[in-house]
Amino acid sequence: ERPKLPDNYTRDTWQKLHEAVGAIQSSVSIKYNLEELYQAVENLCSYKVSATLYKQLRQVCEDHVKAQILQFREYPFLVKTFSFIYFQIMIRSIFLFLDRTYVLQNSMLPSIWDMGLELFRNHVISDKQVQNKTIDGILLLIERERNGEAVDRSLLRSLLSMLSDLQVYKESFEQRFLEETNCLYAAEGQRLIKPLIACVEKQLLGEHLSAILQKGLDNLLDENRISDLTQTYQLFSRVKGGQQILLQHWSEYIKNFGTTIVVNPEKDKDMVQELLDFKDKVDHIIEVCFQKNEKFINLMKESFETFINKRPNKPAELIAKYVDSKLRAGNKEATDEELERILDKIMIIFRFIHGKDVFEAFYKKDLAKRLLVGKSASVDAEKSMLSKLKHECGAAFTSKLEGMFKDMELSKDVMYMQNQSDPGNIDLTVNILTMGYWPTYTPMEVHLNSEMIKLQEVFKTFYLGKHSGRKLQWQTTLGHAVLKAEFKEGKKEFQVSLFQTLVLLMFNEGDEFSFEEIKMATGVEDSELRRTLQSLACGKARVLIKNPKGKDVEDGDKFIFNGDFKHKLFRIKINQIQMKETVEEQVSTTERVFQDRQYQIDAAIVRIMKMRKTLGHNLLVSELYNQLKFPVKPGDLKKRIESLIDRDYMERDKDNPNQYHYVA
């Protein structure tokens, strides 16, 4: 058990501390040893007297400050202020334990130093007479120094620091200081005019260009301080070499800020929007502050290109997905004109990307889904984006994308002709896709019901009758349907994927099925079936009830038809699942791009070697960099060269291993 404090210990100790504080404030020697006083504070804090001790100390300091106001109004104020700062340091050193324990744990309480500053600000500096005297004294010191007299610079520096610490520098001092400075230079200007301006520019700017920019340019740009940036540009333009240094720092800022947006995977969700906002911001600064200076525009473009390619491939993928989000049906946030403006801005960012094939792969995958699942917001917007890409990258880049649109148009014509020849009670729409234009889909054999198979056969007979020699392969992953359903509340229609259709149609034959039974009956691949059942039993529109409940579909789960299903809409879309990108899809799209790149490298090497017959390694690599349109590492090129040597497309020179010969 801790020893108890002697009676009256708290009172006697406080008395001792009170005397010590009084002695410090009166500039007389302290009767007690400083270590003894520090220990006394520690003892009181250990026995939970901290709160009282803090209040008593604050009261003593406040009483002292109030009592001193009259003296503060008298001259020499500056020395008096300096003494106050010294006293506060001394008092804090005695009460350091209190400051570092109780005060630190109570975030609402100011530290002893801040408390002193607060009291000083509230009672002394806020006194107009004291304030004016302070500023007069500081300005007088500055004026004397400007007139060549020796002054105590450390005192001046401490006083200015004090005004800054008390947060009154700007409102109390800065304006008057600037006015005085203004008057000084106005008078000097009248006397010296041009030689003085040249001198001031040289000394205040010319000699410190880098230092000024290092200290303040980033803040001005971060805070978008347009008028200050305009002044900076105008001032730096007046000094020899000023614009050049401003250009360098401008470029560094763009690269550094842009890199923070691009390289952090946690920011991927907002990367493209942040890039667009950042581009808008720098464009505005160039236009308003930098007078549309071409050098600043060109360097901005170079800087964007540098930082956006620091992380290969990902920005291109995310730009494609951002465009998809804007062109998708249900994007209510933009009018046609706004959408056009957004697409124009996206194209500017797209220009900076080196690996445009990554963009093309993801754009193509998303466009295919928009077209096939009927989720495109507007054909006009789609075609506008296509023409922008064609203008930017050439016809070869967009030929497959244009082919996809042609397929959709031709499919409409084919369906019209087929429906004329054989109208059925189920409306079947088939999209006939030319294999080379569309993304590669892995065929999935599923068990369609007899009506669907019959419809497929009727269409197949009709189509192959018109186009002999062609082969049809049915792709089930992006098929979708509209199902009619009856519930206790009434009739509903569901917009569903083909997989969802196969699952739901089972419930015409029974009210409950297990996961294994559904898998057996539909033939849908395991992970795809789990996603499908999740969307029907765990989403917002729960047409099925899962037993046991839970977010994930497990083996052995049972699914029951939800006869009590209710929804405010008549037609309900449950096939958003088809638009959502799976991890496998993302990986396979990226892998396909890398595979295509290898083919392109191989083709380029063979083309160059066929033309040149014999070539040194460095010349071959340099030629490849000129021809390839995507970023590639020297190591990857070396692997492709080795692969072609192994496959006898070329060979090494017997005497010089860095020389290659084409093998015909």
Image: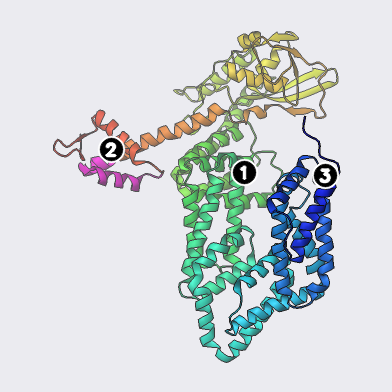
Question: Closer to the N terminus: mark 1 or mark 2?
Answer: 1
**Closer to us: mark 1 or mark 2?**
1
Q: Amino acid at mark 2?
A: Val
Q: Earlier in the sequence, mark 2 or mark 3?
A: 3
Q: Residue 413: name its quadrant.
A: top right
Density class for disc 2 (Cα within 10 Å; few <14, some 14-19, many ≥20) is some
Q: Is residue 119 above or below residue 367?
A: below
- Earlier sequence position, callout 3 versus callout 1: 3
Q: Which residue is mark 2?
A: 606
- Residue 455: image location, x then y, percent: 61, 18
Answer whether residue 348 is visible to the viewer in this image. Answer: no
Residue 362 marker: none
Residue 97 covered by magenta stretch: no
Q: Is residue 473 above or below residue 555?
A: below
Residue at figure coordinates x 62%, y 11% from the top left: 519
Foreground tag (2 vs 3): 3
Question: Residue 645's quadrant in the figure?
Answer: top left
Q: Which mark is residue 270?
A: 1
Residue 646 percent location from the top left of the image: 25, 28
Task: From the image, tell me which residue sits under label 3.
Answer: 9
CA gap, disc 1 to disc 2?
42 Å
- For the N terminus, the image quarter is top right
Residue at the image point whose x is 70% and y is 16% from the top: 504
Q: Residues within 10 Å of mark 3 (few under 14, many from 20)?
A: few
